[in-house]
Image (cartoon, rainbow, N blue to C red):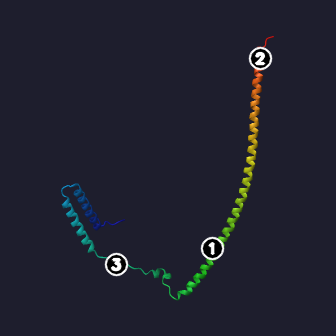
Amino acid sequence: MRKFDLLNFFYGLGAAIILVAALFKFLGLEGADALFIVGLVGEAIIFLISGAQPVFKQRTYNWERLFPQLDRDEDDEAVATVSMENAEVTQEQQIQQIIQSIVGLNSSVENLNSATQRLTGYVEKLETNYEMVNSSTLDYHKEINSLKIKIASANDKLKEFENYKF
């Protein structure tokens, strides 16, 4: 939760009075000079007060006590050497893990490649079957149209026969 700062409030109040005074001055309204005087005197007083405020010394912390790594002496060189050896072992372990990950990734890529080749074969078969079905469908439509024509011709002959009187 923020604490109310009285000095900051008066800074803003003085600035607001000066802005309103400037507006009055631009518009030619009465009281602009008085507002300017009040605002500028108020700001001057606030600056005087803020200049006299005491400055609190910022506390310094001894981080070396919390983090001894920050305070390195010559005795710590041996500890640093051991730490470097541990870091090298850790790096070797990380490299081994990376290599294992790459081997696993290679296997996954090979499986994906195999699956893609199989899928390509299935798509080619589907395309061949589609062409065969399309060709058969065209032949079927031709036969149906031919049959329609023959049935229409047969119907015409039947009507002629019915109209024929004995």
Q: Is residue 135 left or right of residue 92?
A: right
- Numbered disc 3: secondary structure: loop
Quarter of the rendering occupied by the N terminus: bottom left
Give the mark, 2 or 1, whose residue is nearer the N terminus. 1
Q: Is residue 10 left or right of residue 155?
A: left
The answer for how far apart the CA atoms under marks 3 and 2 are is 124 Å
Q: Nearer the viewer, residue 16 or 152?
A: 152
The answer for how far apart the CA atoms under marks 2 and 1 are is 97 Å
Q: Which residue is mark 2?
A: 160
What crowding class fits label 3: few (fewer than 14 Cα within 10 Å), some (14-19), or many (20 or more)? few
- Please identify the residue farthest to the right as the structure is shown: 166
Residue 55, quarter of the rendered image: bottom left
Answer above or below: position of 47 versus 115: below
Q: Which residue is mark 1?
A: 94
Answer above or below: position of 115 versus 89: above
Quarter of the rendering occupied by the C terminus: top right
Task: Determine which of the numbered discs, if any, sits on residue 134 in the image.
Answer: none
Instruction: Identify which amino acid the numbered label 3 is placed on.
Output: Lys
Instruction: Identify which amino acid the numbered label 2 is placed on.
Output: Glu
Q: Which residue is mark 3?
A: 57
Instruction: Identify which amino acid the numbered label 1 is placed on.
Output: Gln
Residue found at x 23% / y 59%: 21
